Image (cartoon, rainbow, N blue to C red):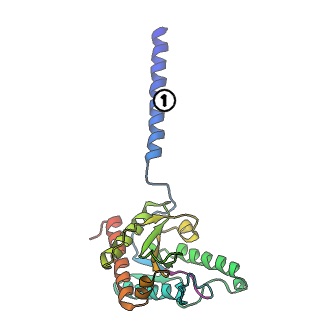
Amino acid sequence: MFFIIKMKRIYIAFAILILVGMIYMSKVETIPVTAIELKEPTYTIVIDAGHGEPDGGAVSKDGIREATLNLEVAQELAKEMDALGYNIIMTRHDENNIADENQQDSVRKMKVSDISNRVKIVNSSDADLCISIHMNKFASERYYGWQTFYNKNSEYNKILAEEIQAGITNNIDRKNDRVALNIKDIKLTDESKIPTTIVECGFLSNPEDLRLLQTEEYRAKLVSGIIEGVENYYSKIYGEE
């Protein structure tokens, strides 16, 4: 009887060790469960130019509106990627927002409808990924440079953001120690069902960033960097050369 009881204790202890090990492994697992499931690449990309009149987004001291620069970068990116053979879907094609017509009578309603429509476009696109173009602004003029953001509900979001961050850094000869950062409570990145990143191209509050962002040459470098990041993302995820 003593032997049986002892063996039962051993089995129980062993079972507890297994259970503890399973719990521990679940805690150290770095790849979260996500609704994003990769399929064979279609080379279709959604390019989202953030904001849209009358929502100008961030505004510089001398009145340069984020929405305008977002659209310029997005259109130049779309043109270059189209030339490379990518299928491009734009969330907006002109200076205006994309809220429903019956939601334009207040700023709040317009913004809610606008971002909801962007999410609908992304999730109905059957695209491989989404790149949302924005500009940054801060109270101090000292901050400058580009930075990508992602939601960590999928490892693919992080990889996409990191590759684009690195791609821009490789194409612009300016010191920038920023890295891709996780964000939450942003509807586009929270609810997108495909890998999505927000690319903040620079600070409208920084005089040098603002000057550069208004030049075609600098925007071309940004575009080249984004494309490099996208192609490295495809290579890493799909094993393409």
Q: Where is residue 167 in the image (x, y as percent from the top left)?
A: 34, 74
Residue 88 location, quadrant:
bottom left
Residue 206: in magenta span: no
Rendered view: 4 above or below 16: above
Region rendered in magenta: 48-53
Q: How crowded is mark 1: few (under 14 residues within 10 Å), some or many (20 or more)?
A: few
In this view, the residue in front, 26 or 109, is: 109
**Residue placed furthest toward the top:** 1
- Dot 1: element: helix
Residue sitting farthest toward the left: 241
Q: In this view, does 98 lie to the left or right of 85?
A: right
Q: Predominant secondary structure in magenta?
A: loop
**Number of numbered callouts drawn:** 1
Which amino acid, by three-letter code, is at mark 1? Answer: Ile
| Residue 71: image location, x then y, percent | 49, 87
Q: For the C terminus, give its image quadrant.
A: bottom left
Is residue 128 visible in this depiction of the protein?
no
For the point 36% across and 72% down, the residue is 176
Residue 104 on image: x %, y %: 69, 85
Q: Nearer the viewer, residue 231 or 42?
A: 231
Question: In the rendered image, is residue 189 in sight?
Answer: yes
Question: To which residue does mark 1 refer?
Answer: 16
Task: Return the x and y of residue 55 as percentages of the image width and height.
Answer: 61, 84
Figure check: 224 above or below 147: below
> Is residue 49 on the magenta stretch?
yes
